[in-house]
Image: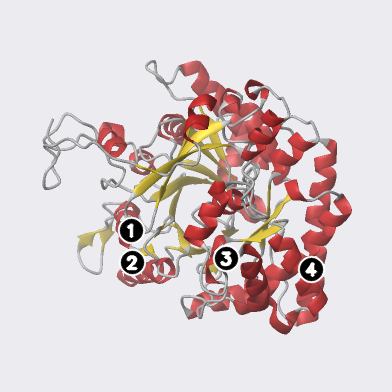
């Protein structure tokens, strides 16, 4: 690694990410940001020695609060929450209008939104009060997607939006196909909408700014147990996920059945409209002992609880729901690096089980005791594992529960404004091992594990046993190739996912190349090494006949 990279960053990408996203007046260095943030959030709620410990934990990247915490450190407004959870509450004109207002209010803070639309009646249903017919939930999803398209916080942070629909909703068939852009031909061309999106990612498409999932409830699970048949909707859901990556799967059973509200990345769940995420992640790769890990869990939990008293919110109802639920989303990252450091494969080892028990036990105990000491409501949930994309890059470690993505990859990103750029990178964890003489071809990655989805799903299920909300994780799959999806693979994946469903809260798939604008693309190690350190502009070669929204061929 280069000598001039300032501690605690591990790569130029980490430094660039900090400079582009989080560095601002009063937070010119990572240490200054850590110190400012702890003071902003904790004030008199913690004694000075604990605040000093927190500054050290954050500045050494053992604990990193969510990106909105980092962005708003030292700023006048304190919109510390990464996301908001909304519900289409009743099928009325008033609720339709109110849902747009809530969505825009939340997105304008820089937070993402997730909405369950299952309470809206099916398309074509009669509306007795006006003599008309209902539009159904999907047009409203499209409206919120367009709000998200036009809201870009700070000129660089794209809106994060999520939509879900119950598996038994009459419109679920249309919902399953909404993002199947391969079947939509662009007027005046021979190109599908998917083709055009691969040429120009900014070309508008239905729900292109929205992650979508189907909700599966206790009735679905009990029918599966009774008959062994997951049902036609589930099979179609699997087929679509293995083809285009969406919709994903949201599992909500028994006491969690009503927790269908999710944030855009799906790790935080709630049954209450206008609930809120409150995220921070512990970096296992920088913690040497289980005893110290316990200390980090305790102080991180206190930090997030303080955040429930300090964060500004978009509107009054969110404050009411936060006061009732006070959700904490303490997560983990660097898990795969931690395993590699110990010479282990990508599996939940006995030692990792020990650490996960500490994670669960300490966060529950400290959450209960510290909220009592502060005289506030006890959090209804304490743990959620976020994807940690940006903060994982800051820490130079593996994100969330994910394996190393690839030995080498090309990362595209949006700078302030609308210019897409890209850089070549060698994964830091992989780089370290390679410098120690390890053959790059022997390191497990998301790409090499793409053919072993059972191992990935099993890993997620075993970690989920310790998490009281959800885990955001993307199951990378191989590109379909020219032969497409075969029946045996479809059947085997359906059976595997149905088997693990009772132990999961959700699952998202991504076949390589399924969408245009893919932010990370695996590249040969030698190619990445040749271009390291360069920031390159992405020049889209668009058909010269594309004019006024019509793309000729």
Residue bearing mark 3: 70
Residue sitting at 73 percent across and 64 percent down? 300
Asked whether 428 or 215 is in front, the reply is: 428
Give how far across and how far down residue 434 sits, in percent.
Answer: 67, 29
C-alpha separation, residue under disc 3 versus residue under disc 2: 33 Å
Mark nearer the N terminus (4 vs 2): 4
Asked whether 542 or 435 is in front, the reply is: 435
> Quick one: SS at disc 3?
helix
- In this picture, is 411 found above or below 442? below
The label nearer to you, 3 versus 2, is: 3
C-alpha separation, residue under disc 4 versus residue under disc 2: 47 Å
Q: Are marks 4 and 2 in contact (CB under 8 Å)?
A: no
Label 2 crowd (10 A; few <14 / some 14-19 / many >=20): some
Q: Are marks 3 and 2 in contact (CB under 8 Å)?
A: no
Residue farthest to the right, as pictured: 291
Residue bearing mark 2: 96
Mark nearer the N terminus (4 vs 3): 4
Residue sitting at 54 percent across and 28 percent down? 494
C-alpha separation, residue under disc 4 versus residue under disc 1: 38 Å
Residue bearing mark 4: 53
Residue bearing mark 1: 417
Quarter containing the C terminus: top left
Mark nearer the N terminus (4 vs 1): 4
């Amino acid at each position: 690694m280069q000598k001039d990279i300032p501690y605690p960053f591990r790569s130029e990408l980490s430094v660039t990410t900090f400079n582009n996203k989080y560095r601002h007046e009063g937070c010119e260095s990572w240490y200054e940001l850590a110190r400012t943030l702890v003071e902003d959030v904790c004030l008199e709620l913690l004694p000075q020695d604990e605040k000093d410990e927190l500054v050290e934990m954050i500045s050494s990247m053992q604990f990193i609060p969510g990106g909105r915490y980092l962005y708003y450190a030292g700023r006048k407004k304190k919109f510390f929450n990464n996301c908001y959870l909304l519900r289409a509450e009743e099928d009325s004109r008033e609720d339709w209008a109110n849902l747009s207002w809530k969505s825009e209010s939340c997105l304008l803070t820089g937070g993402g939104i997730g909405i369950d639309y299952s309470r809206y009646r099916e398309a074509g249903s009669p509306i007795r009060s006006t003599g008309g017919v209902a539009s159904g939930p999907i047009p409203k999803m499209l409206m919120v997607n367009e709000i998200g398209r036009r809201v870009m916080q700070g000129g660089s942070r794209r809106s994060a939006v999520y939509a879900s629909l119950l598996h038994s909703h009459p419109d679920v068939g249309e919902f399953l196909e909404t993002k199947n852009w391969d079947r939509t031909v662009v007027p005046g061309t021979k190109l599908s909408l998917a083709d055009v999106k691969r040429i120009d990612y900014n070309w508008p498409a239905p729900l292109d700014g929205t992650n979508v999932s189907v909700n599966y409830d206790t009735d679905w699970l009990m029918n599966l147990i009774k008959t062994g048949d997951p049902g036609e909707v589930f099979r179609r859901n699997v087929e679509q996920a293995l083809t285009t990556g969406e919709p994903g799967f949201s599992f909500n059973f028994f006491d969690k059945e009503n927790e269908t509200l999710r944030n855009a990345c799906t790790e935080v769940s709630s049954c209450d409209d206008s609930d809120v995420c409150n995220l921070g992640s512990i970096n296992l790769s920088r913690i040497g002992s289980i005893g110290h890990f316990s200390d980090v869990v305790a102080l991180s939990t206190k930090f997030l609880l303080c955040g429930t008293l300090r964060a500004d919110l978009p509107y009054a109802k969110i404050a009411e729901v936060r006061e009732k639920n006070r959700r904490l989303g303490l997560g983990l990252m660097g898990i795969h690096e931690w395993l590699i450091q110990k010479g282990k494969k990508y599996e939940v080892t006995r030692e990792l089980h020990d650490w996960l028990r500490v994670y669960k036990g300490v966060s529950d105990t400290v959450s209960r005791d510290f909220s009592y000491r502060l005289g506030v409501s006890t959090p209804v949930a304490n743990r959620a594992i976020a994807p940690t994309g940006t903060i994982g890059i800051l820490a130079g470690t593996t994100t969330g529960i994910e394996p190393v993505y690839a030995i080498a990859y090309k990362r595209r990103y949006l700078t302030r404004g609308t210019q897409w750029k890209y850089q070549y990178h060698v994964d830091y964890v992989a780089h370290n091992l390679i410098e120690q003489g390890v053959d790059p071809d022997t390191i497990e990655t998301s790409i090499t594990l793409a053919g072993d989805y059972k191992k990935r799903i099993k890993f997620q299920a075993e970690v989920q046993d310790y998490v009281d909300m959800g885990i955001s994780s993307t199951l990378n799959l191989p590109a379909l190739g020219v032969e497409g999806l075969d029946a045996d693979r479809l059947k085997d994946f359906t059976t595997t996912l149905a088997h693990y469903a009772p132990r999961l809260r959700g699952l998202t798939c991504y076949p390589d190349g399924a969408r245009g604008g893919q932010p990370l693309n695996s590249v040969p190690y030698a190619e990445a090494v040749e271009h390291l350190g360069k920031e390159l502009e992405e020049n889209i070669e668009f058909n010269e006949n594309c004019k006024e929204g019509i793309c000729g061929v």
